[in-house]
Structures are given as structure tokens and as C-alpha cells.
Image: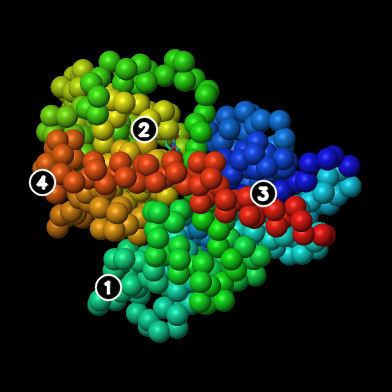
């Protein structure tokens, strides 16, 4: 039997879930003497960005991609979350076969799923493994998930129609119902049922690894650790950050371009792996960036009517440059650079020329901006991003949130106004640099050798190693 105990990871589809799982696995392998195996449920061939990560797995981390699931009878209005959850649930028997094939060659100590993968717990029980959740979102999101059972019972209308804002336990600011995660915004949609199903099953886990840290969301982490609703133990282990793909970096045009720009002069614009804008909104953004007069680097995707159109394949099928306003590229030459679909985000954020981040507020992007001390323009699109935007702008106060106009768009003037304020540290943005630097230092401290997150992760690993199975 191999000497290193093994943790089995079962990530749900989507880069935002996959990336932090891989980074957590690397910590377990490099710092804690464990091995890891990824059993990956799939809906089809993995996207290019995911394949690059899989192919660069270090020794000690293995993977198997399961045969794609076939959905039958999914209604036309089925949401991405429904498909994530079903992809995992329909793969349970293949996951069981893969786990079974590992028995005898290694000691299987824990099974780690994410917030949508709790149906796999039955496999952990069968093979006497610890069942853990890696929650790749904020403490506020986790607290809202536990609070949800109460909301579900007492709120009869759609959450977006709730007349008053309310407090999620531990949160220092109020949220509106419309800022709750997407899958709960339509109670008649199947996504709502599946979300609740997984929320309830969080109680069955032996522990939850949370990608947040005590100095970032102090009261919320504390409330979660008190376990008032009888939750399992919560371990705050963040920031678990993307170390970035090395593939293609030497030729990366945008990093070379950044090398030539003054310190903190460039706004990085990215809506994550999945975010897409409508054609009208894409045009307003282009015109707003031009109007701002500031330098920018924009990872642009082709427009689409749905906000997360590229979630299942981060690469745009059509050339996004074709949708820009006429003459735009000529007018912004020397001041703005556009890359199609995917940028080396971590390297861009850590570059000294980057001074602002117009972000869709995915949780990984949020942590990456904080850890590199880059202030935000918070432009949430889907999933739980609106709640992250509330955290960034109202609680942590390290970003500005654009106002949507009567046409449902963020207008060019509003964009230009916020870009100027953020990049020039003016008006409402004047205290942001100091606040984000404090958080940057706190993030580094949390994962230092004797930091709180490092200790929490060690506590969990010790539990895994010492529990007899
Ligand atoms: N990412 C990247 N380049 C891109 C877009 C995204 O490297 O052009 C990475 C980003 O650094 C982050 C992840 O993909 O680690 C996106 O996760 P996040 O939670 O921010 O958003 P999601 O894509 O899940 O909506």
C-alpha cells in the first residue's frame, strides 16, 4: 500500500470551483504529506483552461475524468446550478467504482466535495472516509446558506420582492433579497429545490473547509464557528489562491504590455471564466473605458443574452472583437489592450502596473484582488456575486459599485466616473488604497507559517490522519 494517505476530491463543473480545489490539494500534498485524487464528473470534454491545469498536476495528485453524464428531460429553463448538481448526482455510481479501485493501493482518509456535491457523501460512508465540504465562497455565503432554511419557511414571496433588507447572521451589513444567490431567485425553478437539497445536506458533513479567513469576515466566521444551528465544524483556511497556469506565459502579450506601463496605472477588466455581457452593455463598457481616459486591459468575451454564457466553456466561440464599437480599437491604441476570452489573471493582478480591477466578483477573483491589494469596481453578474459585491463595497469598503440605469444598463458616463474615481483615488475612493492594503497584509498573515488559516488546515489534516477507519 502506498505510504501517503489519500484525499479524494470530487469537484463540480466550472473553473471557479475547480481551481481552488486544486490549490487546496497542492497544499495537502506539498505541506502535509498527503496524496490526492481528483474524480471529475463531466458534462463533456473539459474546457482548454481546465485541461491545462490537469496536465500540469504535480506528483502526488492524480485525476480521472468520468464519462459525461446524459441529461434527460431537462426543462429549457434549467439553470447552470441544476446542471452542476445533476452532473455530480448522476455520476455517483461511477465515483463509487473509481473509489473502489483505489482501495488497497492507498489509505483513503477523506472525501472532499463542494457545496453542490453533497450527494457523494454516500460513497464516503460506504468506504469509511471522512466527509468534508470545501466551500469555495465567502463566510457570508455560507452563513446565508444555513440561514436559508429559516428564510425558506418564513418568506412567502420571491426573495427579490422582500420589502426590507435583512441581516445574514454575523454580517456587518444588511442585504436585500435581490442580492441573494441566483439559484434561489425563482422558487418555481428546479435550481431552488436542488440548492435547498444541498444546503440541508451540509449538516451531514464532518466538517466544512471555508475559503475565507477570520480577519476578512471576523463576525461571520465567529458565528459559523459557534455552530448555533448545529452545523458541522467550520475551518477558515483562506486565502486558497490560484497559483496561475504557466502555459503560454512567456508569450503573453498582455504581461509584456503591462511591463511598459507606469505603476498602478492600468485597470484590469474581467468577468471571470463565465461572465458575459449583452451587446448593448458591452458597447457601453467600451465607450465608458474610452471616456475615462485611463489605461485598461480587458479580457473580452463575445456578448450573450445570458450573464454566464461561457461558464461551461470559457473560450468565446465567436471573435469578441467583432462586436466592439466602430473605430474603438484605433482610438484606444496605446492606452488600452484587449485579450480574447482568457487572461493570466493572477499574473496581471500581481503586476505592479495594475491599479484597479473591474470584476464580476466571483469569489476567487475577489480573494485574488484582495491578496494582491488591487481595489475593485464591483460589477456582479450571476451566482452569489451580488452578495460578494455587497461585501466588497459596503462591508470591506474596498470597491465601488456602478449604478444600473432605467434601461437596465450601466451607462458609459457612470463607468467613466467610477474608473476615474478609483484610478485617481478620489472622492468615495479616497480611503480604498489604505483599506485594501490592510486586507492584503491580513491575507498574507493568515497563510503564513503560524497564521490562523495555516493552523486551521493543519488541525483538519491531523484529524484526518489520526481518525482510524
Ligand atoms: N481566471 C483567469 N483568467 C481569466 C478568467 C478567470 O485566470 O481570464 C481565473 C481567475 O483567476 C479565478 C478563476 O479563473 O481564479 C475564476 O473564478 P471566480 O470565482 O472569480 O469566477 P467564476 O469564473 O467562477 O465566475
Give the mark nearer the N terminus: 3 vs 4: 3
Q: Which residue is mark 1?
A: 165
Gap in angstroms between the C-alphas marked 1 and 4 = 27 Å
Q: Residue at x 51, y 33 (%)?
A: 243
Where's the C terminus, which quadrant?
Answer: bottom right
Task: Categorize mark 3 by other alpha carbons within 10 Å: few (<14), some (14-19), many (20+).
Answer: many
Left or right of 442, for residue 428? left
Give the mark nearer the N terminus: 2 vs 3: 3
Give the mark nearer the N terminus: 4 vs 2: 2
Which disc number belongs to residue 9?
3
Badge 1 residue CB within 8 Å of ligand 1: no
The kind of secondary structure element at disc 2 is helix
Q: Residue at x 25, y 58 (%)?
A: 394
Give the mark nearer the N terminus: 1 vs 2: 1
Question: Do labels 4 and 2 touch, CB within 8 Å?
Answer: no
Question: Do labels 1 and 2 touch, CB within 8 Å?
Answer: no
Question: Do labels 2 and 3 touch, CB within 8 Å?
Answer: no
Amino acid at each position: 500500500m502506498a505510504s501517503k494517505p489519500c484525499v479524494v476530491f470530487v469537484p463540480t463543473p466550472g473553473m471557479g470551483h475547480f481551481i481552488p480545489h486544486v490549490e487546496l490539494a497542492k497544499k495537502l500534498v506539498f505541506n502535509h504529506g498527503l496524496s490526492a485524487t481528483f474524480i471529475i464528473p463531466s458534462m463533456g470534454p473539459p474546457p482548454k483552461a481546465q485541461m491545462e491545469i490537469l496536465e500540469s498536476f504535480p506528483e502526488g495528485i492524480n485525476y480521472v475524468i468520468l464519462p459525461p453524464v446524459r441529461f434527460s428531460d431537462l426543462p429549457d429553463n434549467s439553470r447552470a446550478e441544476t446542471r452542476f448538481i445533476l452532473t455530480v448526482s448522476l455520476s455517483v455510481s461511477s465515483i463509487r467504482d473509481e473509489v473502489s479501485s483505489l482501495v488497497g493501493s492507498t489509505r483513503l482518509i477523506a472525501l472532499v466535495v463542494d457545496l453542490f456535491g453533497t450527494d457523494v457523501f454516500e460513497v464516503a460512508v460506504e468506504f469509511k472516509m471522512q466527509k468534508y465540504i470545501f466551500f469555495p465562497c465567502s463566510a457570508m455565503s455560507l452563513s446565508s446558506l444555513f440561514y436559508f432554511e429559516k428564510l425558506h419557511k418564513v418568506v412567502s414571496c420571491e426573495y427579490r420582492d422582500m420589502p426590507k433588507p435583512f441581516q445574514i447572521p454575523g454580517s456587518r451589513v444588511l442585504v436585500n433579497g435581490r442580492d441573494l444567490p441566483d439559484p434561489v431567485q425563482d422558487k418555481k425553478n428546479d435550481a431552488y429545490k436542488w440548492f435547498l437539497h444541498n444546503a440541508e445536506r451540509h449538516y451531514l458533513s464532518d466538517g466544512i473547509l471555508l475559503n475565507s479567513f477570520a480577519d476578512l469576515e471576523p463576525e461571520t466566521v465567529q458565528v459559523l464557528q459557534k455552530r448555533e444551528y448545529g452545523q458541522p465544524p467550520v475551518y477558515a483556511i483562506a486565502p486558497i489562491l490560484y497559483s496561475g497556469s504557466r502555459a503560454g506565459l512567456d508569450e503573453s502579450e498582455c504581461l509584456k504590455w503591462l511591463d511598459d506601463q507606469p505603476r498602478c496605472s492600468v485597470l484590469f477588466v474581467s468577468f471571470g471564466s463565465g461572465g458575459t455581457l449583452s451587446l448593448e452593455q458591452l458597447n457601453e463598457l467600451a465607450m465608458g473605458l474610452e471616456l475615462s481616459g485611463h489605461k485598461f486591459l480587458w479580457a473580452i468575451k463575445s456578448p450573450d443574452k445570458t450573464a454566464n454564457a461561457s461558464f461551461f466553456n470559457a473560450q468565446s466561440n465567436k471573435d469578441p472583437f467583432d462586436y466592439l464599437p466602430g473605430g474603438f480599437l484605433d482610438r484606444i491604441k496605446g492606452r488600452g489592450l484587449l485579450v480574447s476570452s482568457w487572461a493570466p489573471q493572477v499574473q496581471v493582478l500581481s503586476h505592479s502596473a495594475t491599479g484597479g480591477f473591474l470584476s464580476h466578483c466571483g469569489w476567487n477573483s475577489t480573494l485574488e484582488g484582495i491578496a494582491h491589494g488591487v481595489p475593485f469596481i464591483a460589477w456582479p453578474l450571476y451566482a452569489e456575486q451580488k452578495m460578494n459585491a455587497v461585501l466588497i463595497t459596503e462591508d470591506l469598503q474596498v470597491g465601488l459599485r456602478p449604478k444600473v440605469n432605467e434601461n437596465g444598463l450601466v451607462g458609459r458616463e457612470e463607468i467613466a466616473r467610477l474608473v476615474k474615481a478609483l484610478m485617481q483615488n478620489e472622492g468615495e475612493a479616497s480611503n480604498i488604497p489604505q483599506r485594501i492594503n490592510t486586507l492584503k497584509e491580513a491575507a498574507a498573515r493568515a497563510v503564513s507559517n503560524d497564521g490562523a488559516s495555516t493552523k486551521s488546515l493543519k488541525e483538519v489534516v491531523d484529524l484526518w490522519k489520526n481518525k482510524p477507519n
